[in-house]
Image (cartoon, helix red, strand yellow):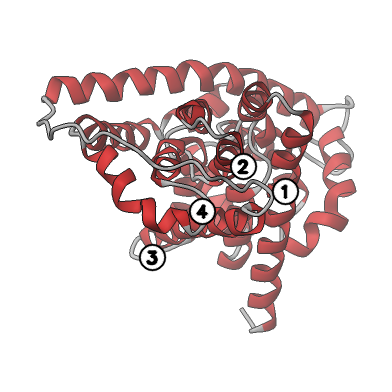
Amino acid sequence: MVDGLGTVLTFLPVILVFFVAMALVEDSGYLVRIAFLMDRWMARLGLDGRAFVMQLMGMGCNVPAIMGTRVMRDRPMRLLSMLTIPMSLCSARLQVFVFLAAAIFAPSRAPWVLLGLYIASFAAVIVTALLFRGRFASREPFVIELPPYRLPTLRQVWLRGWVEVKHFLKRATNFIFFGVVAVWLLTHLPAGAAPAGPDTIAGWIGTAMQPVLGPLGIDEKLAVALIFGFVAKEVVIGAFAVIYGLEGNALAAEFARSMDWVAATSFMVFTLIYTPCLSTVATLRSESKSLGFTALAVGWPLVLAWVASFVFYQGMRALGY
């Protein structure tokens, strides 16, 4: 528990900076203007400017962004928005990518890797919207009121950022606590097996998933972390610490030793797109009132993630990397 929680909490400064920046954009009145400016482009995807704002909100957390689609009266547009929001690079995924980018890539390249993942996130949104806009066609006109610009106070921005971080901590800590305990049990049972070895339950699960994940460069240990990432993406870093029995710089050094940049990028692409976390799935079910739509929202990202990672990994290997 110490290794798992401690490793995750080291990324709190990054999360705080993100939420403070979002508070500045939102409280200044510019967020509404982003919706107005992006409406023409989003219309080509079967959406409107409000959907773009929800994508930005999804970079904090997918759950409130999905709930925010209630402002859309037209059900097809709302469903299409809810289908694309989980593709946003949320703060939980961000800490996984910051860790791997810092561990695998040189300091001069790591920021570009993160930028590339944000671009890949928007690309996944565009592909999803273009494929499903016919199924969820909408005719709702876009009408919005533009509030005056305001200059947010430092206290206001700080409080907004701190409230979001507290919410993140409260939500993440519960998931991480139970998640890392479950990972420890899977990597240490049955009794007598080498920790995180092939004879543990985690080893069995990872081996069983190799026919599917092996072509993506994802090994048995990473496969187990992905399973717990379905519960909450915040658990992935904690799962790394428990599975490898390391934390902090030692864990980063182990990844740098055991993975090359192609395998690391393939894993990050898969983590970016694949099945949203359990809280997001529950929210999708609650907001859509449809089991069929929820199944689509779970299954489609999984398929897209596999295809994207497979194309990248096999393509890079074919080029000799």
Q: Residue at x 52, y 56 (%)?
A: 45
> Looking at the picture, does residue 48 appear above or below residue 158?
below
Q: Which is more N-terminal, label 3 or label 4?
A: 3
- Of residues 187 and 179, which is closer to you in this image? 179
Report if the CB atoms under discs 4 and 3 are less than 8 Å apart.
no
Q: Locate the N terminus by quadrant.
A: top right
| Location of residue 149 in the rendering, given as x and y in whole percent from the top left corner | 12, 35
- Under circle 4, the secondary element is helix
In the figure, is residue 66 to the left or right of 57? right
- Of residues 216 and 186, which is closer to you in this image? 216
Q: Residue at x 38, y 56 (%)?
A: 40
> Which residue is disc 4 drawn over?
121
Q: Residue at x 39, y 40 (%)?
A: 53
Report if the CB atoms under discs 4 and 1 are less than 8 Å apart.
no
Report if the CB atoms under discs 1 and 2 are less than 8 Å apart.
yes
> Which residue is disc 3 drawn over?
109
Q: Which is more N-terminal, label 1 or label 4?
A: 4
- Rounded to the nearest angstrom, the CA distance separating label 3 from label 2 is 32 Å
Amino acid of disc 4:
Ser
Amino acid of disc 1:
Trp
- Under circle 2, the secondary element is helix
- Rounded to the nearest angstrom, the CA distance separating label 4 from label 1 is 15 Å
Picture disc at residue 300? 1
- Rounded to the nearest angstrom, the CA distance separating label 2 from label 4 is 13 Å
> Which residue is disc 2 drawn over?
83
- Rounded to the nearest angstrom, the CA distance separating label 4 from label 3 is 19 Å
